[in-house]
Image (cartoon, helix red, strand yellow):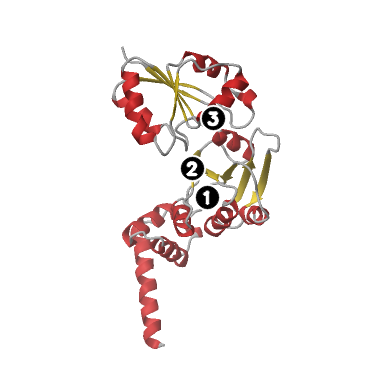
Amino acid sequence: MTGTLVLAGTPIGDVADAPPRLAQELTAADVIAAEDTRRLRRLSQALGVQPAGRVVSYFEGNESARTPELVEALAGGARVLLVTDAGMPSVSDPGYRLVAAAVEKDIRVTAVPGPSAVLTALALSGLPVDRFCFEGFLPRKAGERLSRLREVAGERRTLVYFESPHRVDDTLAAMAEVFGAERRAAVCRELTKTYEEVRRGPLEELAAWAAEGVRGEITVVVEGAPEKGAEEVDAAELVRRVRVREEAGERRKEAIASVAAEAGRPKREVFDAVVAAKRSALEAGRSG
């Protein structure tokens, strides 16, 4: 018989938040795959347990190479416990490759639910929680970051991001530029820890606050785009949105389709507006 892969949530700050089953799984697992074995050791000590199984490292740098080894152990009947530094495995952490490989081999996968920075920040944000999407970390390079933000500029669901304290000021400034200075957001810092803080306000205001320096683990929650009627977006704005997407590297055809869907307009109408604007620019150039 094949074994079982167990994904276990770990505390995102306060060790008292560890699910009771985590201690049981730490003593029952044949193999424990940990993002950081030193953190696992400290967590086990805090929980008053001693892992009985073999402990191996499983992080971004060796995830691809170690996955076959763990799948082989599972195929041989082992109970493999996967833990990351904080929160649930696979959510912006190692885990997806192993789960996919286990599923492909028809190996049972289960979970020990635990703390999640995504859901905790969302609940504390004060923003709509009925529909949301998690975007993980944004690219480090400014151009790529702006491009990624433009892709979701019209997203009406609440957006959740992880960010480094060293880049959060630039990220908030970029969000204010793309989403609008008045778009509401919340910056959640050091969740469940001693210096937990949630700053809420318009993106422009939060960017100014973050420019003074921010420390700790950061989760940013941003209000979704407001729902606008088609009559609120004129031809010039449609052309501007297409241009922004083109500058980000999107082909004109796809840019027109995206803008049309976002604004609730027929693609033909957006296409005609772009052609008319181009014609006007050419005529202005000739007359000049």
Residue sitting nearer the eye, 150 or 139: 139
Quarter-of-image position of residue 107: top left
Q: Residues within 10 Å of mark 2 (few under 14, many from 20)?
A: some
What residue is at 37 percent from the left and 60 percent from the top?
249
Report x, y in % for residue 116.
Answer: 55, 31
- Amino acid type for the residue under numbered disc 2: Gly
Q: Residue at x 45, y 65 (%)?
A: 240
Q: Position of residue 191 (x, y in %)?
A: 63, 36
Q: Mark number for residue 90?
A: none
Give the alpha-carbon distance from disc 1 to disc 2, as whole Å. 18 Å
Mark 3 closeness class: few <14, some 14–19, many ≥20 residues within 10 Å? few
Circle 1: element type: loop
Residue 136 bears which disc, if any?
A: 2
Q: CA distance from mark 3 to mark 2?
A: 25 Å
172 or 284, nearer to the observer:
172
Q: Which residue is mark 3?
A: 38
Q: In the rendering, at what x and y percent does residue 54 appear?
A: 44, 20
Please identify the residue farthest to the right as the structure is shown.
194
Where's residue 135, x and y in %?
48, 43
Q: Quadrant of residue 252?
A: bottom left
- Asked whether the beta carbons under mark 1 and mark 2 sit within 8 Å of each other, the answer is no
> Badge 1 is on which residue?
225
Q: Nearer the viewer, residue 145 or 123?
A: 145
Q: Amino acid at mark 1?
A: Ala
Q: How many marks?
A: 3
Is disc 3 placed on a helix, strand or loop?
helix
Labels 3 and 1: the sequence-earlier one: 3
22 w.r.t. 270: above or below: above
**Residue that appears at 41% across and 57% down:** 259
Above or below residue 18? Residue 268 is below
Between marks 3 and 1, how big is the CA–CA gap?
A: 42 Å
